[in-house]
Image: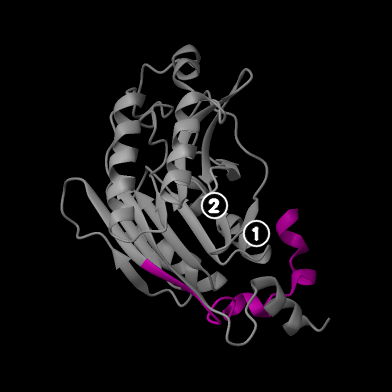
Amino acid sequence: MKPLLLLLFTFGLWAGESTSFTMAGIRVIPDAWDKQANLKRIEKYTREAVAKGAQVVVTPEGFLEGYVANNKRQPDITRERLAAVGERIDGPLLTRLKGLAKELRIHLVVCFAERRGDKMFNSLAIFTPQGEVAMSYHKSHNAEDEPFNDTGTQFPVVDTPLGRWGTLICYDRQLPETSRILAIKGAQLLIVPAWGSFGDMNTAMMRTRAFENGVWVAFVHPQQFLLIDPRGKIVAQDNGEKGDQLVFGRVTLDDRIGKAAIRSRKPQLYGEILK
């Protein structure tokens, strides 16, 4: 297969093909340690989002437990306290959210402190309209501020009826290699829940990640929401005001995806980056 055809095949962008859907970001600050209260918030805002036409709903980083793993935010965090608040992906609270996705027939992206055996991860899960786990992802980088979390080692992508998606969590986005790996794997949309820095510098970074890879980027933070198209244009964002908000944006997966400098890569020249 010729290189151009391979690239088009990877991104699924044959002539005339287009997919469009509405995404909602839950731009809300959760309560630290209170999983039940935050679960109710997810249910409340997800139902409201769907009533207003959303087909995909995304929470910020660590939303279920209130992102307590960060020792700058929670100086008294211990391994035992974090483990106690952790949830298994097949546990009762996440099973309830899987049921919510099935009931409402949507894709629901939920971020939570995940407990796997004796290890803890900063994780997200994508639940499908069938109530299944389409994909889970473990945050792969941190700024040495999550001392009791293990980090992930893989960058999965998932095919959905609404396109091919990749995910990152917060600090992952600051390393350009992470987004590039997902784009090379054919991700058309990068979903990036976060908790840390936001504002003008973050906006510039997220626009760059979209532009340099020719992909959509959705950034969902308790105090900022951005939806950016493959040309680096912001197509939806929050109103900048304080207080809880649901923010909506329309994603259109079309032949703009992949039409960026990523087409001109010469991997055979880049070996030095591995030294």
- In percent of width and height, residue 237 lies at 29, 63
Residue 46 in the image: above or below residue 164? above
Q: Which residue is mark 1?
A: 181
Name which residue lies at 74% across and 83% down: 5
Residue 231 in the image: above or below residue 133? below
Is residue 157 something that shows in the picture?
A: yes
- The residue type indicated by label 1 comes to Ile
Name which residue lies at 20% across and 60% down: 239
Q: Which residue is mark 2?
A: 167
Identity of the residue furthest to the front in this view: 103
- In percent of width and height, residue 51 lies at 29, 55
Q: Nearer the viewer, residue 133 or 121?
A: 133
How many marks are shown on the rendered structure?
Answer: 2
Which image quadrant for residue 6? bottom right
Which image quadrant for residue 30? top left
Identity of the residue furthest to the top in this view: 80
Residue 56 in the image: above or below residue 147? below
Is 136 contained in the magenta span? Answer: no
Q: Is the N terminus in the top left, top right, bottom left or bottom right quadrant? A: bottom right
Q: Mark 2 and mark 1: span between their CA atoms?
A: 11 Å
Q: Nearer the viewer, residue 183 or 58?
A: 58
Q: Nearer the viewer, residue 229 or 132?
A: 132
- In percent of width and height, residue 198 lies at 32, 52
Name which residue lies at 28% across and 29% down: 31
Labels 2, 1: front one:
2
Is residue 27 something that shows in the picture?
A: no
In the visual, does 41 lie left or right of 188?
Answer: left
Is 268 contained in the magenta span? Answer: yes
Name which residue lies at 45% across and 41% down: 110
Q: Residues within 10 Å of mark 1 (few under 14, many from 20)?
A: some
Marks 2 and 1 close (CB-CB < 8 Å): no
